Amino acid sequence: MTDNGQICGFCCKEIEHIHWYGRTGAAQDGAVALFWTASGFAVETGAGALWTELEASWSQYEPWVGVWVDGVQVSRFMPEEGRHWYCLFRGLPAGTPHRIALLKETQAMSGDPQHRLLVHALGVPRAAADKPFLPLQARSRRIEFVGDSITTGEGLAGAVDEMDWISGWMALRDNYALRTAKAFGADFHILSQSGWGVVTSWDNDRNCVLPKHYGCICSLAGGQENAQLGAQERWDFSRWQPDAVVVNLGTNDCGAFRNPPHTDPQSGAVWKMRVSDDGSQNEEDIAFLQQGIKDFLAAIRSRNPRAHIVWAYGMCGFELGERIRAAVEDYARASGDTAVTFLALPSMSDETEEEKGSRQHPGPGTHRRASALLVQELKRALGW
């Protein structure tokens, strides 16, 4: 514990009653590294105010964080570079418990190996230092979300006509994944990366696919310092077994059909999801995608034996929907796995301003409608 005159600070390893969201890493001094979208912490406190000491670094894409009080987002901000204290909230009545959470709004940045965010400590007013944090109510339900920019929440901040690719346009308020978890009072993990897919990225780079990184803590976070924080280490799936795994991938695999070939800088191989002379997707490449879906479902099942798996698709269009549905159903039939379903999600429309977000991504309205359908599906499948 440290006392700077205004607050008493507690390093993370000293805090008994704290909940960590997501696959996190650890520094030698006990600081916790937040890699993925919506990674962060929650505490229950009657201190009336809460501070946290964060350390941020980046070269291109700065991290953003959001502050939530009793399940409602009250602010979001960009931490300064370096190590600093921040007041998350103050002015609450002392002695009245409140759940305060900090969640990383931006995804892990595969394109910026210097992108990092660490939590070193939490602080409370000196008068509350004897009993700063209260036991948290246990959350017995768990949902894991695996996706692309939609699951990251890209487009949920910024005006509709904003098109620059910057981290500030990634946000969590109204994100379908958080709304779904909140509907069930569930703990959650998110693994997402903008532009990535099942077998290829939007620009035909077959290195940029989520299945390659599913078994690690956050291996797409490059650089030596992220490696020292544990990003490249294997994830211990026994630590956190979800009741449901929701996969929302395929949008970028579809986009690759419309984009130029990609040349791998290491092997020189040229990759392209091809279009046939009649304008339809090449059947060999469709089969390649469908096999990738089946392989990923098998990998998810091997690590999460009791989870119900939902493959959801459609928020940015349903062009490959029936092809993806067929792959999911083929996997279920061939494997005998009855706890796997496909769910068609609603596409963003022009009906209201809230349907579309920035960067031609789904807005709050689309996320809300998608979450409503996903909640229904999980209720049906799990009896929640």
Image (cartoon, rainbow, N blue to C red):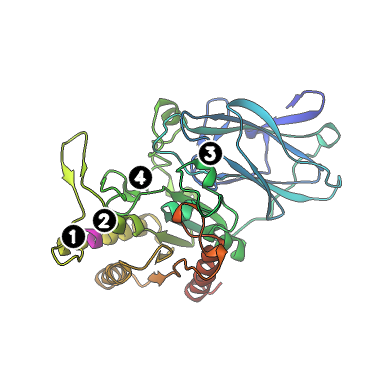
Q: CA distance from mark 1 to mark 3?
A: 40 Å
Between residues 61 and 207, which one lies in front from this camera angle? 61
Q: Earlier in the sequence, mark 3 or mark 2?
A: 3
Magenta stretch: includes residue 202: no
Q: Quadrant of residue 279?
A: bottom left
Q: CA distance from mark 3 to mark 4?
A: 16 Å
Amino acid type at circle 2 is Arg
Residue interval drawn in magenta: 287-291
Helix, strand or loop for disc 3: loop
Q: Is residue 16 above or below residue 315?
A: above
Q: Which residue is mark 4?
A: 213
Q: Which residue is mark 1?
A: 275
Residue 241 visible in the shown view: no
Q: Residue at x 43, y 52 (%)?
A: 149
Q: Position of residue 88 (x, y in %)?
A: 71, 40
Amino acid type at circle 1 is Val
Q: Which residue is mark 3?
A: 34
Q: Which residue is mark 2?
A: 258
Marks 2 & 4, CB-CB < 8 Å contact: no
Classify 10 Å Cα crowding around label 2: few (below 14), some (14-19), many (20 and above).
some
Does residue 193 appear to the left or right of 54 in the view shown? Answer: left
Q: CA distance from mark 4 to mark 1?
A: 28 Å
Q: CA distance from mark 2 to mark 4?
A: 25 Å
Marks 1 & 2, CB-CB < 8 Å contact: yes
Which quadrant: the N terminus?
top right
